[in-house]
Image (tube, rainbow, N blue to C red):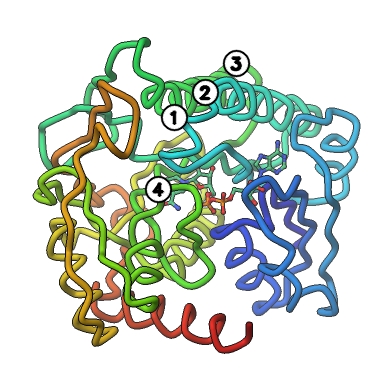
Amino acid sequence: MKVFITGGAGFIGSHMAEALLDRGDAVMVLDDLSTGRMENIDHLIDRPGFEYRVGSATDTPLVTELVDRCDVTMHLAAAVGVKLIVDQPVHTIETNVRATEVVLEATAKKKKLVVVASTSEVYGKGVKIPFAEDDDLKLGPTANSRWAYACSKALDEWLALAYWREKGVPVIIPRFFNTVGPRQTGRYGMVLPTLVAQALQGDPLTVYGTGQQTRCFGHVRDVVAAVLALVETPAAVGQVINIGSQEEVTILQLAEVVRELTEADSDIVLVPYTEAYAEGFEDMQRRVPDVSKLERLIGFRPRTSLEEIVRDVVADQRSRLAAT
Ligand SMILES: NC(=O)c1ccc[n+]([C@@H]2O[C@H](COP(=O)([O-])OP(=O)(O)OC[C@H]3O[C@@H](n4cnc5c(N)ncnc54)[C@H](O)[C@@H]3O)[C@@H](O)[C@H]2O)c1
Protein backbone atom coordinates (compact mmCIF):
# COMPACT_ATOMS: atom_id res chain seq x y z
CA MET A 1 0.00 0.00 0.00
CA LYS A 2 1.19 3.56 -0.69
CA VAL A 3 0.04 6.16 1.80
CA PHE A 4 -0.06 9.91 1.20
CA ILE A 5 0.48 11.87 4.43
CA THR A 6 -0.18 15.61 4.48
CA GLY A 7 1.70 17.15 7.40
CA GLY A 8 4.05 14.16 7.30
CA ALA A 9 7.05 16.15 8.56
CA GLY A 10 5.14 17.02 11.70
CA PHE A 11 5.06 15.26 15.02
CA ILE A 12 2.30 12.67 14.47
CA GLY A 13 2.89 12.55 10.68
CA SER A 14 6.56 11.59 10.99
CA HIS A 15 5.71 8.77 13.42
CA MET A 16 2.96 7.64 11.04
CA ALA A 17 5.41 7.61 8.11
CA GLU A 18 7.93 5.61 10.12
CA ALA A 19 5.35 3.03 11.28
CA LEU A 20 4.16 2.53 7.70
CA LEU A 21 7.70 2.07 6.36
CA ASP A 22 8.45 -0.36 9.20
CA ARG A 23 5.60 -2.61 8.09
CA GLY A 24 6.64 -2.45 4.43
CA ASP A 25 4.30 0.19 3.04
CA ALA A 26 5.38 3.07 0.79
CA VAL A 27 4.90 6.67 1.94
CA MET A 28 4.53 10.04 0.20
CA VAL A 29 4.83 13.03 2.53
CA LEU A 30 3.64 16.55 1.73
CA ASP A 31 4.53 19.29 4.20
CA ASP A 32 5.02 23.06 4.00
CA LEU A 33 7.38 22.93 7.03
CA SER A 34 5.38 25.61 8.86
CA THR A 35 5.38 23.78 12.19
CA GLY A 36 6.96 20.57 10.89
CA ARG A 37 10.70 20.07 10.48
CA MET A 38 12.96 18.25 8.03
CA GLU A 39 14.75 16.96 11.13
CA ASN A 40 11.65 14.83 11.84
CA ILE A 41 11.99 12.91 8.57
CA ASP A 42 15.73 13.13 7.86
CA HIS A 43 16.17 9.56 9.11
CA LEU A 44 13.52 8.30 6.65
CA ILE A 45 14.76 9.92 3.46
CA ASP A 46 16.99 7.03 2.36
CA ARG A 47 14.53 4.30 3.25
CA PRO A 48 13.01 2.36 0.32
CA GLY A 49 9.48 3.50 -0.45
CA PHE A 50 9.82 6.95 1.11
CA GLU A 51 9.20 10.13 -0.90
CA TYR A 52 8.49 13.67 0.18
CA ARG A 53 7.54 17.04 -1.28
CA VAL A 54 7.77 20.45 0.33
CA GLY A 55 4.56 22.27 -0.57
CA SER A 56 1.11 23.16 0.66
CA ALA A 57 -1.91 20.95 1.17
CA THR A 58 -3.92 23.88 -0.23
CA ASP A 59 -2.19 23.45 -3.64
CA THR A 60 -4.94 21.69 -5.63
CA PRO A 61 -2.88 20.39 -8.60
CA LEU A 62 -0.12 19.07 -6.32
CA VAL A 63 -2.52 17.40 -3.88
CA THR A 64 -4.52 15.87 -6.75
CA GLU A 65 -1.35 14.42 -8.28
CA LEU A 66 -0.20 12.93 -4.97
CA VAL A 67 -3.64 11.53 -4.06
CA ASP A 68 -3.74 9.86 -7.49
CA ARG A 69 -0.36 8.23 -6.90
CA CYS A 70 -1.37 6.74 -3.53
CA ASP A 71 -3.95 4.24 -2.22
CA VAL A 72 -4.86 5.95 1.05
CA THR A 73 -4.59 9.57 2.22
CA MET A 74 -3.94 10.65 5.81
CA HIS A 75 -4.73 14.33 6.12
CA LEU A 76 -2.80 15.53 9.16
CA ALA A 77 -1.66 18.97 7.93
CA ALA A 78 -3.18 21.72 10.03
CA ALA A 79 -2.40 24.85 11.97
CA VAL A 80 -1.97 23.52 15.52
CA GLY A 81 -0.89 24.55 19.01
CA VAL A 82 -2.81 26.86 21.32
CA LYS A 83 -0.23 29.64 21.05
CA LEU A 84 -0.10 29.61 17.26
CA ILE A 85 -3.89 29.47 17.05
CA VAL A 86 -4.35 32.49 19.30
CA ASP A 87 -1.56 34.47 17.57
CA GLN A 88 -2.53 33.61 13.97
CA PRO A 89 -6.31 33.09 13.69
CA VAL A 90 -6.50 33.91 9.96
CA HIS A 91 -3.78 31.39 9.11
CA THR A 92 -5.49 28.82 11.38
CA ILE A 93 -8.92 29.05 9.80
CA GLU A 94 -7.61 29.25 6.22
CA THR A 95 -5.22 26.32 6.59
CA ASN A 96 -7.61 24.04 8.39
CA VAL A 97 -10.63 24.59 6.20
CA ARG A 98 -9.05 25.08 2.73
CA ALA A 99 -6.60 22.21 2.93
CA THR A 100 -9.32 19.79 3.99
CA GLU A 101 -11.55 20.90 1.11
CA VAL A 102 -8.69 20.40 -1.36
CA VAL A 103 -7.84 16.94 0.00
CA LEU A 104 -11.48 15.77 0.02
CA GLU A 105 -12.10 17.05 -3.51
CA ALA A 106 -9.01 15.21 -4.74
CA THR A 107 -9.90 11.92 -3.02
CA ALA A 108 -13.51 12.19 -4.22
CA LYS A 109 -12.46 11.75 -7.85
CA LYS A 110 -11.46 8.11 -7.31
CA LYS A 111 -13.26 7.53 -4.00
CA LYS A 112 -10.05 6.64 -2.19
CA LEU A 113 -9.97 6.17 1.57
CA VAL A 114 -9.05 9.33 3.46
CA VAL A 115 -8.33 9.82 7.17
CA VAL A 116 -9.12 13.38 8.31
CA ALA A 117 -7.48 14.25 11.64
CA SER A 118 -9.74 15.99 14.13
CA THR A 119 -9.28 16.92 17.75
CA SER A 120 -10.76 16.70 21.23
CA GLU A 121 -10.86 20.51 21.07
CA VAL A 122 -14.19 20.17 19.25
CA TYR A 123 -15.80 19.16 22.58
CA GLY A 124 -15.04 22.73 23.66
CA LYS A 125 -16.42 23.58 27.07
CA GLY A 126 -18.40 20.35 27.40
CA VAL A 127 -18.61 19.14 31.00
CA LYS A 128 -20.04 15.66 30.57
CA ILE A 129 -17.07 13.40 31.31
CA PRO A 130 -15.95 11.28 29.50
CA PHE A 131 -16.51 12.88 26.08
CA ALA A 132 -18.34 10.58 23.65
CA GLU A 133 -18.44 11.05 19.89
CA ASP A 134 -22.18 11.80 19.78
CA ASP A 135 -22.14 14.37 22.59
CA ASP A 136 -23.20 17.94 21.84
CA LEU A 137 -20.30 20.30 21.13
CA LYS A 138 -20.13 23.45 23.24
CA LEU A 139 -17.89 26.09 21.72
CA GLY A 140 -17.12 29.55 23.11
CA PRO A 141 -17.78 32.93 21.47
CA THR A 142 -16.31 33.96 18.11
CA ALA A 143 -14.71 36.95 19.85
CA ASN A 144 -12.25 34.50 21.39
CA SER A 145 -9.69 33.22 18.81
CA ARG A 146 -9.09 30.05 20.79
CA TRP A 147 -12.35 28.60 19.47
CA ALA A 148 -11.39 29.17 15.82
CA TYR A 149 -9.31 25.98 15.89
CA ALA A 150 -12.12 23.87 17.36
CA CYS A 151 -14.62 25.35 14.94
CA SER A 152 -12.38 24.86 11.89
CA LYS A 153 -11.82 21.23 12.87
CA ALA A 154 -15.56 20.70 13.47
CA LEU A 155 -16.17 22.09 9.99
CA ASP A 156 -13.56 19.62 8.65
CA GLU A 157 -15.55 16.83 10.28
CA TRP A 158 -18.80 18.03 8.71
CA LEU A 159 -17.12 18.34 5.35
CA ALA A 160 -15.64 14.84 5.57
CA LEU A 161 -18.96 13.32 6.65
CA ALA A 162 -20.72 15.21 3.84
CA TYR A 163 -18.32 13.78 1.26
CA TRP A 164 -19.04 10.30 2.67
CA ARG A 165 -22.84 10.67 2.70
CA GLU A 166 -23.30 12.64 -0.50
CA LYS A 167 -20.43 11.45 -2.70
CA GLY A 168 -19.55 8.06 -1.21
CA VAL A 169 -15.95 9.00 -0.36
CA PRO A 170 -14.73 6.60 2.37
CA VAL A 171 -13.60 8.79 5.28
CA ILE A 172 -12.40 8.01 8.80
CA ILE A 173 -12.28 10.86 11.31
CA PRO A 174 -10.13 10.25 14.40
CA ARG A 175 -10.56 12.81 17.17
CA PHE A 176 -7.10 12.89 18.75
CA PHE A 177 -6.89 13.77 22.43
CA ASN A 178 -3.57 15.12 23.76
CA THR A 179 -0.94 13.14 21.89
CA VAL A 180 2.65 13.33 23.05
CA GLY A 181 6.00 11.66 22.56
CA PRO A 182 9.44 12.08 21.04
CA ARG A 183 9.88 14.85 18.41
CA GLN A 184 7.01 17.00 19.66
CA THR A 185 8.15 20.57 20.12
CA GLY A 186 7.03 23.08 22.74
CA ARG A 187 7.38 26.01 20.33
CA TYR A 188 3.65 26.31 19.65
CA GLY A 189 2.36 25.95 23.19
CA MET A 190 2.43 22.16 23.76
CA VAL A 191 2.66 21.57 27.49
CA LEU A 192 4.71 18.38 27.96
CA PRO A 193 7.69 19.22 25.71
CA THR A 194 7.73 22.72 27.21
CA LEU A 195 7.88 21.41 30.79
CA VAL A 196 10.58 18.87 29.92
CA ALA A 197 12.71 21.51 28.15
CA GLN A 198 12.38 23.84 31.14
CA ALA A 199 13.38 21.08 33.56
CA LEU A 200 16.41 20.03 31.48
CA GLN A 201 17.58 23.66 31.31
CA GLY A 202 17.09 24.10 35.06
CA ASP A 203 14.43 26.80 34.47
CA PRO A 204 11.21 27.14 36.50
CA LEU A 205 8.39 24.90 35.22
CA THR A 206 5.53 27.18 34.15
CA VAL A 207 1.97 25.95 34.72
CA TYR A 208 -0.92 28.09 33.47
CA GLY A 209 -3.93 28.95 35.63
CA THR A 210 -4.36 26.99 38.84
CA GLY A 211 -2.75 23.87 37.40
CA GLN A 212 -5.86 21.92 38.47
CA GLN A 213 -7.08 21.54 34.88
CA THR A 214 -6.68 17.91 33.77
CA ARG A 215 -5.69 16.21 30.54
CA CYS A 216 -5.09 12.64 29.36
CA PHE A 217 -1.83 12.11 27.46
CA GLY A 218 -1.59 9.37 24.85
CA HIS A 219 1.71 8.09 23.46
CA VAL A 220 2.06 8.87 19.76
CA ARG A 221 3.08 5.24 19.13
CA ASP A 222 -0.29 4.01 20.47
CA VAL A 223 -2.21 6.68 18.59
CA VAL A 224 -0.52 5.82 15.28
CA ALA A 225 -1.18 2.09 15.86
CA ALA A 226 -4.85 2.88 16.49
CA VAL A 227 -5.18 4.89 13.26
CA LEU A 228 -3.49 2.13 11.26
CA ALA A 229 -5.87 -0.44 12.75
CA LEU A 230 -8.87 1.77 11.90
CA VAL A 231 -7.71 1.99 8.27
CA GLU A 232 -7.97 -1.82 8.13
CA THR A 233 -11.47 -1.79 9.67
CA PRO A 234 -14.34 -1.35 7.18
CA ALA A 235 -16.78 -0.48 10.02
CA ALA A 236 -14.68 2.61 10.81
CA VAL A 237 -15.61 4.23 7.50
CA GLY A 238 -17.98 7.18 7.88
CA GLN A 239 -17.25 7.32 11.62
CA VAL A 240 -15.85 9.88 14.06
CA ILE A 241 -13.70 8.04 16.63
CA ASN A 242 -12.04 9.29 19.82
CA ILE A 243 -8.40 8.24 20.18
CA GLY A 244 -6.64 8.91 23.46
CA SER A 245 -5.54 7.67 26.83
CA GLN A 246 -7.91 7.68 29.80
CA GLU A 247 -5.20 8.30 32.41
CA GLU A 248 -6.23 11.71 33.75
CA VAL A 249 -3.67 14.00 35.36
CA THR A 250 -3.69 17.64 36.49
CA ILE A 251 -1.12 19.86 34.81
CA LEU A 252 0.39 20.51 38.23
CA GLN A 253 0.84 16.75 38.75
CA LEU A 254 2.33 16.51 35.26
CA ALA A 255 4.90 19.18 36.17
CA GLU A 256 5.72 17.21 39.33
CA VAL A 257 6.23 13.98 37.34
CA VAL A 258 8.51 15.85 34.91
CA ARG A 259 10.50 17.34 37.77
CA GLU A 260 10.89 13.93 39.40
CA LEU A 261 11.91 12.03 36.27
CA THR A 262 14.40 14.69 35.13
CA GLU A 263 15.72 15.04 38.70
CA ALA A 264 15.54 18.81 38.19
CA ASP A 265 15.42 21.12 41.19
CA SER A 266 13.33 23.70 39.30
CA ASP A 267 10.45 25.49 41.01
CA ILE A 268 6.94 25.06 39.65
CA VAL A 269 5.46 28.50 38.96
CA LEU A 270 1.77 29.22 38.34
CA VAL A 271 1.27 31.74 35.51
CA PRO A 272 -2.14 33.42 35.11
CA TYR A 273 -3.75 32.85 31.69
CA THR A 274 -3.90 36.64 31.21
CA GLU A 275 -0.09 36.74 31.21
CA ALA A 276 0.24 33.81 28.82
CA TYR A 277 -2.52 34.64 26.33
CA ALA A 278 -4.83 37.52 25.42
CA GLU A 279 -7.47 38.74 27.86
CA GLY A 280 -10.54 36.49 27.94
CA PHE A 281 -8.65 33.23 27.20
CA GLU A 282 -10.75 30.23 28.20
CA ASP A 283 -9.45 26.78 29.05
CA MET A 284 -11.24 23.51 29.68
CA GLN A 285 -11.09 21.99 33.15
CA ARG A 286 -11.20 18.35 32.13
CA ARG A 287 -10.81 16.43 28.90
CA VAL A 288 -11.23 12.65 29.07
CA PRO A 289 -12.18 10.49 26.08
CA ASP A 290 -14.81 7.80 26.03
CA VAL A 291 -12.87 5.21 24.02
CA SER A 292 -15.49 2.46 23.96
CA LYS A 293 -16.13 3.01 20.24
CA LEU A 294 -12.41 2.70 19.47
CA GLU A 295 -12.16 -0.50 21.54
CA ARG A 296 -15.24 -1.94 19.88
CA LEU A 297 -13.81 -1.26 16.43
CA ILE A 298 -10.17 -2.32 16.84
CA GLY A 299 -9.96 -4.15 20.19
CA PHE A 300 -7.47 -1.86 21.89
CA ARG A 301 -6.82 1.70 23.08
CA PRO A 302 -3.75 3.76 24.02
CA ARG A 303 -2.43 2.41 27.31
CA THR A 304 1.20 3.53 27.71
CA SER A 305 1.51 4.95 31.24
CA LEU A 306 2.19 8.63 31.85
CA GLU A 307 5.49 7.78 33.51
CA GLU A 308 6.67 5.79 30.50
CA ILE A 309 5.60 8.61 28.16
CA VAL A 310 7.45 11.26 30.17
CA ARG A 311 10.56 9.04 30.27
CA ASP A 312 10.46 8.76 26.44
CA VAL A 313 10.11 12.53 25.99
CA VAL A 314 12.94 13.22 28.45
CA ALA A 315 15.22 10.71 26.68
CA ASP A 316 14.40 12.29 23.29
CA GLN A 317 15.12 15.83 24.47
CA ARG A 318 18.32 14.73 26.24
CA SER A 319 19.63 13.09 23.05
CA ARG A 320 18.81 16.24 21.04
CA LEU A 321 20.60 18.43 23.56
CA ALA A 322 23.61 16.11 23.44
CA ALA A 323 23.66 16.33 19.63
CA THR A 324 23.79 20.16 19.58
N1 LIG B 1 -0.64 16.40 18.89
C1 LIG B 1 -1.86 16.47 19.41
O1 LIG B 1 -2.01 16.39 20.64
C2 LIG B 1 -3.08 16.58 18.54
C3 LIG B 1 -4.33 16.58 19.18
C4 LIG B 1 -5.46 16.71 18.42
C5 LIG B 1 -5.37 16.78 17.04
N2 LIG B 1 -4.17 16.78 16.44
C6 LIG B 1 -4.14 16.87 14.96
O2 LIG B 1 -3.18 15.97 14.44
C7 LIG B 1 -2.60 16.53 13.25
C8 LIG B 1 -1.09 16.52 13.39
O3 LIG B 1 -0.72 17.36 14.48
P1 LIG B 1 0.74 17.34 15.15
O4 LIG B 1 0.55 17.33 16.61
O5 LIG B 1 1.56 16.30 14.51
O6 LIG B 1 1.25 18.80 14.79
P2 LIG B 1 2.44 19.26 13.84
O7 LIG B 1 2.42 20.76 13.83
O8 LIG B 1 3.71 18.62 14.25
O9 LIG B 1 1.98 18.69 12.44
C9 LIG B 1 1.23 19.42 11.49
C10 LIG B 1 2.04 19.40 10.21
O10 LIG B 1 1.29 20.01 9.17
C11 LIG B 1 2.18 20.84 8.41
N3 LIG B 1 1.36 21.82 7.73
C12 LIG B 1 0.65 22.84 8.25
N4 LIG B 1 0.01 23.52 7.29
C13 LIG B 1 0.30 22.89 6.12
C14 LIG B 1 -0.07 23.10 4.77
N5 LIG B 1 -0.89 24.11 4.41
N6 LIG B 1 0.43 22.28 3.84
C15 LIG B 1 1.27 21.26 4.17
N7 LIG B 1 1.65 21.00 5.43
C16 LIG B 1 1.17 21.82 6.39
C17 LIG B 1 3.13 21.40 9.43
O11 LIG B 1 4.34 21.89 8.87
C18 LIG B 1 3.35 20.19 10.32
O12 LIG B 1 4.42 19.39 9.85
C19 LIG B 1 -3.22 17.91 13.08
O13 LIG B 1 -4.28 17.83 12.16
C20 LIG B 1 -3.75 18.25 14.45
O14 LIG B 1 -4.85 19.12 14.40
C21 LIG B 1 -3.00 16.69 17.15
| Position above or below: 20 against 238 | below
C-alpha separation, residue under disc 1 versus residue under disc 2: 6 Å
- Quadrant position of the C terminus in the picture: bottom right
Q: Which residue is mark 1?
A: 86
Residue 304 is drawn in which quadrant? bottom left
- Determine whether label 3 and label 4 are within 8 Å by CB: no
In the picture of the structure, the residue carrying the numbered disc 3 is 166
* 212 and 151: which is toward the camera: 212
Please, what secondary structure does the residue beneath circle 3 have?
Answer: helix
Residue toward you, 180 or 119: 180
Q: Distance from label 3 to label 1 (Cα)?
A: 34 Å
Circle nearer the N terminus (1, 4) = 1
Residue in view at x 65 percent, y 72 percent? 18
Q: Nearer the viewer, mark 3 or mark 2?
A: 2
Cα–Cα gap, marks 3 and 2: 30 Å
Does the rendering let one see residue 204?
Answer: yes
Marks 3 and 2 close (CB-CB < 8 Å): no
- Label 1 is placed on what type of residue? Val
